Image (tube, rainbow, N blue to C red):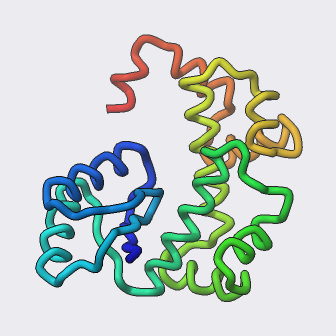
Amino acid sequence: MIIYIKNMVCVRCKMAVQSALEALQIDYESIELGRVKLRDYLSSEQKKALNNALQKYELELMEDKKKVLVEQVKTHILEIFHQPNTDMELKLSAYLSKKLNYEYTYLSNMFSEMEGSTIERFYIVNRIERVKELIMYEDLSLSDIAYQLKFSSVSHLCQQFKKVTGETPSDYKKLCESNDYVWRKL
């Protein structure tokens, strides 16, 4: 049985889910971004207990098929940025259609209806968030980041970064390197 979990988008989230499953003695085969493969079906009591345990971590079980599909779209987009070997030779629309076995128009309409924003906007914002992570935590040049995240050029990366954040990548890097950066973030 596969269950889907909303907001499970990071390693800490996977650890929280693992902890909740183990505390409730629920056997599982695998935990991936957004989903868990269980060894058995959950009783209604187990579902309720698991959902309560997950809520402590701001996670929740999803049973609505539309919500599940939207979370799958988000998960596949986030995987693009965090798994360097992701097959992104296709356009985003073709990639998502291939991964989810739905026409992109349907996915796009469903996403917009449920999220109030477009898939493309989600993609761009999260791509820039990944750029920010790489600037802050990795010692990569903008050229390396542009290449890794498949921007057409450094100039394109800088334009999108400024459009989303209001500052240039260089300004952001200087801010991160300043001593009072932590205090500004709080």
Q: In which quadrant is the C terminus drawn?
A: top left
Residue at image x 61%, y 30%? 134
Nearest the camera: 105 or 27?
A: 27
Q: In which quadrant is the N terminus drawn?
A: bottom left
**Is residue 66 positioned above or below 173 on the image?**
below
Tell me which corner region of the image, top left, top right, bottom left or bottom right, holds residue 105. Answer: bottom right
In the image, taking residue 20 as reference, residue 148 lies left or right, namely right
Residue at image x 39%, y 65%? 36
Residue at image x 53%, y 85%? 113
Tell me which corner region of the image, top left, top right, bottom left or bottom right, holds residue 87. Answer: bottom right
**Is residue 20 positioned above or below 130 on the image?**
below
Residue 164 at x, y percent in the picture: 63, 49
Residue 62 at x, y percent in the picture: 35, 77
Tell me which corner region of the image, top left, top right, bottom left or bottom right, holds residue 128. Answer: top right
Residue 90 at x, y percent in the picture: 84, 63
In the image, taking residue 166 as reference, residue 28 lies left or right, namely left
Residue 150 at x, y percent in the picture: 80, 45
Residue at image x 11%, y 79%? 45
In the image, taking residue 69 as reference, residue 27 lies left or right, namely left
